[in-house]
Image (cartoon, grey):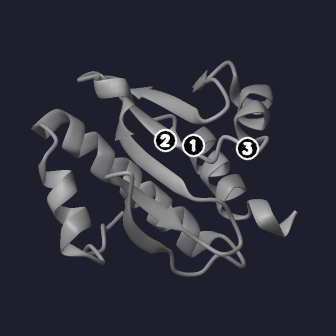
Amino acid sequence: MATPGFQSEAVEARFGEYDDAMRKRLLELRALILDTAAETDGVGPLEETLKWNEPAYLNPAGTTIRLNAHKGSDREIGLYVHCQTDLAERFRQLYGDQLRIDGNRAILIDIAQPLPRDALRHCIAMALTYRRR
């Protein structure tokens, strides 16, 4: 999985603000988002920007996905979706045994644990195609 370059210096700089362990995991998650977008029919290239000073991935066919340390944690990151969608509940129904879902907006990931790639890839694809349903 080759990670493409950043679309903006601001996003690249934001990733540079995280400590090494968190940055490594966030970049791994970024690559998974970009790969999933490229492999999902009807998604196409994403716009990578900052929203609320968080790396964000936008697509007209879906809802925005954001990445950040969870509530200032140095051990957990969040993959955030729009809180007014039903995505978090759907993630919980499908992958509640594999993923930790926080409320109605985030998948939480411990940076010391391996990424549950298959579950995350499916959740990312659902977010990127949310408006097509």
> Which mark's residue is nearer the viewer, 1 or 3?
3
Expressed as whole percent of the image width and height from the top left, the position of residue 89 reads 77, 31
Q: Mark 3 Cα within 10 Å, few/some/many (few <14, many 20+)?
A: few
Q: Around disc 1, counting alpha carbons within 10 Å, would you say few (fewer than 14), some (14 to 19), or many (20 or more)?
A: many
Q: Label 2, label 3: how many angstroms apart (C-alpha)?
A: 15 Å
Of the two numbered discs 1 and 3 on the same chain, state the one appearing first in sequence: 3
Q: Quadrant of residue 9?
A: bottom left
131 to the left or right of 57? right
Is 3 placed left or right of 85 in the picture?
A: left
Q: Amino acid at mark 1?
A: Leu
Q: Position of residue 90 (x, y in %)?
A: 79, 36
Mark in the foreground, 2 or 3: 3
2 vs 1, front mark: 2
For the point 59% across and 43% down, the residue is 118
The label on residue 65 is none
Residue ID for mark 3: 84
Q: Residues within 10 Å of mark 2 (few under 14, many from 20)?
A: many
- Kind of residue sitting beneath label 2: Leu
Q: Secondary structure at mark 3?
A: loop
Number of on-image labels: 3
Viewer-proximal residue among 128 and 8: 8
Tell me if 121 is positioned left or right of 17 in this view.
Answer: right
Locate the N terminus by quadrant. Answer: bottom left
Q: Residue at coordinates 11% horizontally, 39% vertically from top-left?
A: 20
Looking at this view, is 5 or 2 the one in front? 5
Report how far apart the C-alphas of labels 1 and 3 lie in the structure.
Answer: 20 Å
Element type where label 2 sits in the image: strand
Q: Give the answer, above or below, for where 3 lies relative to 70.
A: below
Q: Which residue is mark 1?
A: 120
Q: Name the residue type under label 3.
A: Gln
Which circle marks residue 79 in the picture?
A: 2
